[in-house]
Image (cartoon, rainbow, N blue to C red):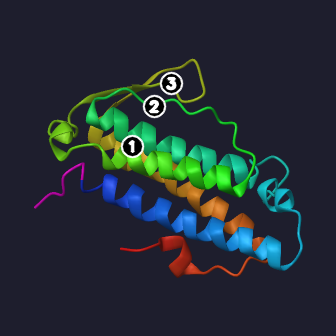
């Protein structure tokens, strides 16, 4: 039996964003306990040419909401990208979780074969079937940014582990 596009996306986005919330909560507590300026963690990056933690979280949530919306055939919600604090990032994740929770499985009925047209950061458009968009584009990018956010915090001494990253399932 083939899993549906809905069950291959929404529960995974929900689980992993929940894990990201846990990791960010631990990072905020770590900063407070160690008397570290929270901005030191929010602006931390693994390498100078990579996005900092704050942007990694923004991009991870962008992928969750945009992939879910396109697969459901609804408009992608716009977020301001003006987060500055851990609380702001938590609110952003909650906003995205609420959005994807509001999507109905019926909206994904023809998602596997739906044509998805994307212009990911470039003027060149890419065309996918919904199945390919999710499995070959959306999920890999989403996991890259959630993993990088986790790695930034772990690298900076926040005591998080695989159970935190994976979240509740």
Image marks 2 and 1: residues in contact by CB distance under 8 Å: yes
Quarter assignment of residue 58: top right
* Number of other residues with Cα within 10 Å of mark 3, as a class: few under 14, some 14 to 19, many 20 or more: few
* Number of other residues with Cα within 10 Å of mark 1, as a class: few under 14, some 14 to 19, many 20 or more: some
Task: Give the alpha-carbon distance from disc 1 to disc 3, as whole Å.
Answer: 22 Å
Tell me where residue 112 appears, x and y as whole percent. 22, 40
Examine the structure image and report whether residue 152 is included in the region drawn in magenta: no
Task: Give the alpha-carbon distance from disc 2 to disc 3, as whole Å.
Answer: 16 Å
Tell me where residue 16 appears, x and y as whole percent. 46, 63
Q: In the rendered image of this protein, does residue 141 appear above or below residue 35?
A: above
Image marks 2 and 3: residues in contact by CB distance under 8 Å: no
Looking at the picture, tell me which residue is in the foreground, 164 or 38.
38
Q: Residue 2 shows which numbered tag?
A: none
Q: Residue furthest top?
A: 123
Q: Where are the magenta residues, as a range?
A: 1-6
Tell me where residue 119 appears, x and y as whole percent. 50, 24
Residue under circle 1?
Answer: 99
Q: Residue at x 81, y 58 (%)?
A: 44
Looking at the image, residue 83 sits to the left or right of residue 110; the answer is right
Residue under circle 2?
Answer: 77
Q: Quadrant of the C terminus?
A: bottom left
Q: In the rendered image of this protein, does residue 119 appear above or below residue 101?
A: above
Q: Quadrant of the N terminus?
A: bottom left
Looking at the picture, tell me which residue is in the foreground, 5 or 30.
30
Q: Earlier in the sequence, mark 2 or mark 1?
A: 2
- Of helix, strand and loop, which one carries label 3? loop
Q: Residue at x 74, y 76 (%)?
A: 158
Task: Give the alpha-carbon distance from disc 2 to disc 1, as whole Å.
Answer: 8 Å
Q: Residue 119 shows which numbered tag?
A: 3
Magenta region, mostly helix, strand or loop? loop
Q: Residue at x 40, y 48 (%)?
A: 98
């Amino acid at each position: 039996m083939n899993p549906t596009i809905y069950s291959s996306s929404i529960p995974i986005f929900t689980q992993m964003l929940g894990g990201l919330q846990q990791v960010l909560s631990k990072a905020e507590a770590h900063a407070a306990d160690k008397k570290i300026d929270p901005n030191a963690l929010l602006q931390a990056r693994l390498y100078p040419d990579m996005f900092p933690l704050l942007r990694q979280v923004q991009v991870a949530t962008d992928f969750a909401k945009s992939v879910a919306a396109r697969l459901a055939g609804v408009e992608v919600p716009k977020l301001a990208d003006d987060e500055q604090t851990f609380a702001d990032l938590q609110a952003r994740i909650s906003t995205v979780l609420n959005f994807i929770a509001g999507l109905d499985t019926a909206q994904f009925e023809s998602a596997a074969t739906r044509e998805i047209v994307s212009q990911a950061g470039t003027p060149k458009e890419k065309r996918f079937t919904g199945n390919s968009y999710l499995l070959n584009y959306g999920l890999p990018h989403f996991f890259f940014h959630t993993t990088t956010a986790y790695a930034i915090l772990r690298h900076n001494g926040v005591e998080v582990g695989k159970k935190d990253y994976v979240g509740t399932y």
